[in-house]
């Protein structure tokens, strides 16, 4: 199996991290791969470590007229399949690709960006259902979950983060963006005296959230850690992992917390609502409900029986659907199915793009 990956992601982020980890895991399975993407340092280091060849591509307006470059890369690499990661990468795929193109959906993206895709994959069952509901042919839609992306990292001392050993610590692994509900968890922690908050991530709203922490009087027990590559060590050192998102099609943090046997507290965004069973594999609260989130965090911190139950339930859910080897096996099987089904006929108009198209 020879896979050409097209990746137009940011320097850091959850989707970007998963794509890198998936590529490394595929390499361990003997899959031959080549990556076309932006030359971000973290990504390049990952590709080098996996022995991966790489072609830089900017994904700018200028690069769009150079779409033939992607076709040439697929031809020269003799690819069996092209994996276009997310909407922007898929939108740059030109016509007349020499092999099937798999379009990856980490969320509920517009189908117009996937005009050249021959097979679609959603990271949750509901995303796949939504694709079919919007006109994708059901036999050309698959589901591949993400797994916890937790490379080994040195053990972390709480003293390294100016945090006492004796206090409860809530960890959020997230971009600092409006969609992620960071303001909600700041307001929740303000209702929990003595609880410390670690925010591992960066983003455009960081200054706003730092100011809010000051206003709420919790700046002394809130740590803005920036983007981190030691998520495993952070999870090992915390007491509770929280996912306070307003919008979250899935959230790889879910299987990461489960795999590390940490109690998970999340809002009822789409991903957690599908996979977290309230009171069994995590605790759920309403979106934008700071009081409800504070209450769930309090239970996860202080109620040992509930804590043990949701940790055990999360671990079972992780092993059932999100373990790394299992996910990569599903991804390889999906590549094989898409390759066997072959390409779809070119269409002049988008319209009901995926409906009633036949293999060429």
Image (cartoon, rainbow, N blue to C red):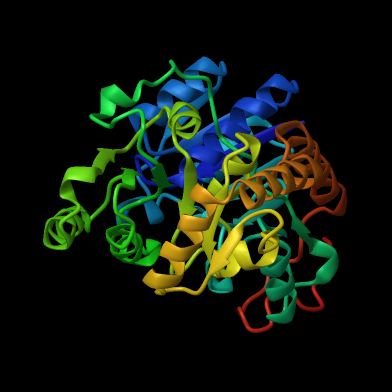
Q: Is residue 50 above or below residue 328?
A: above
Q: Quadrant of residue 105?
A: bottom right
Q: Is residue 193 above or below residue 108?
A: above
Q: Residue at x 27, y 60 (%)?
A: 190
Q: Could you tell me how many numbered marks the image carries? A: 0
> Residue 239 appears at what percent x and percent y?
47, 39
Q: Quadrant of the C terminus?
A: bottom right
Front in this rendered view, residue 136 or 153? 153
Q: Is residue 165 above or below residue 102?
A: above
Would residue 72 be seen by someone viewing this image from the given angle?
Answer: no
Apparent side of residue 41 relative to residue 148 in the rendered image (left or right): left
Q: Quadrant of residue 251?
A: bottom right
Apparent side of residue 142 relative to residue 175 in the rendered image (left or right): right
Would residue 43 be seen by someone viewing this image from the given angle?
Answer: yes
Q: Is residue 215 above or below residue 52?
A: below
Q: Residue at x 80, y 50 (%)?
A: 338
């Amino acid at each position: 199996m020879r896979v050409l990956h097209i990746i137009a992601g940011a320097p850091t982020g959850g989707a970007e991290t998963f794509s890198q980890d998936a590529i490394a895991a595929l390499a361990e399975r003997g899959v031959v791969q080549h990556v076309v993407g932006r030359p971000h340092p973290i990504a390049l280091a990952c590709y080098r470590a996996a022995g991966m060849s790489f072609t830089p591509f900017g994904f700018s307006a200028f690069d769009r007229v150079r779409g033939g470059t992607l076709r040439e890369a697929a031809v020269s690499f003799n690819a069996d399949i092209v994996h276009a990661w997310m909407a922007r990468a898929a939108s740059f795929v030109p016509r007349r690709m020499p092999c099937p193109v798999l379009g990856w959906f980490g969320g509920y993206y517009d189908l117009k960006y996937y005009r050249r895709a021959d097979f679609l994959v959603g990271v949750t069952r509901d995303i796949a259902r939504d694709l079919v509901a919007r006109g994708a042919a059901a036999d050309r839609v698959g589901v591949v979950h993400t797994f916890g992306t937790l490379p080994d990292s040195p053990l972390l001392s709480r003293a390294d983060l100016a945090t006492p050993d004796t206090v409860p610590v809530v960890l959020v692994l997230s971009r600092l963006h409006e969609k992620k509900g960071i303001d909600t968890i700041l307001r929740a922690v303000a209702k929990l005296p003595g609880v410390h908050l670690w925010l591992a991530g960066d983003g455009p709203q960081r200054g706003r959230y730092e100011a809010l922490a000051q206003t709420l009087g919790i700046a002394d027990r809130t740590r803005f850690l920036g983007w981190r590559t030691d998520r495993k060590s952070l999870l090992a050192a915390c007491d509770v992992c929280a996912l306070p998102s307003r919008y979250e099609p899935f959230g790889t943090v879910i299987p990461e917390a489960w795999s590390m046997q940490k109690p998970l507290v999340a809002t009822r965004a789409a991903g957690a609502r599908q996979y977290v069973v309230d009171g069994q594999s995590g605790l759920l609260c309403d979106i934008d409900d700071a009081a409800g989130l504070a209450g769930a965090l309090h239970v996860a911190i202080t109620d040992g029986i509930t804590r043990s139950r949701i940790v055990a339930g999360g671990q079972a859910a992780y092993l059932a659907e999100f373990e790394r080897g299992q996910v990569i096996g599903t991804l390889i099987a999906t590549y094989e199915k898409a390759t066997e089904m072959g390409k779809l006929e070119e269409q002049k108009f988008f319209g009901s793009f995926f409906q009633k198209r036949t293999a060429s």
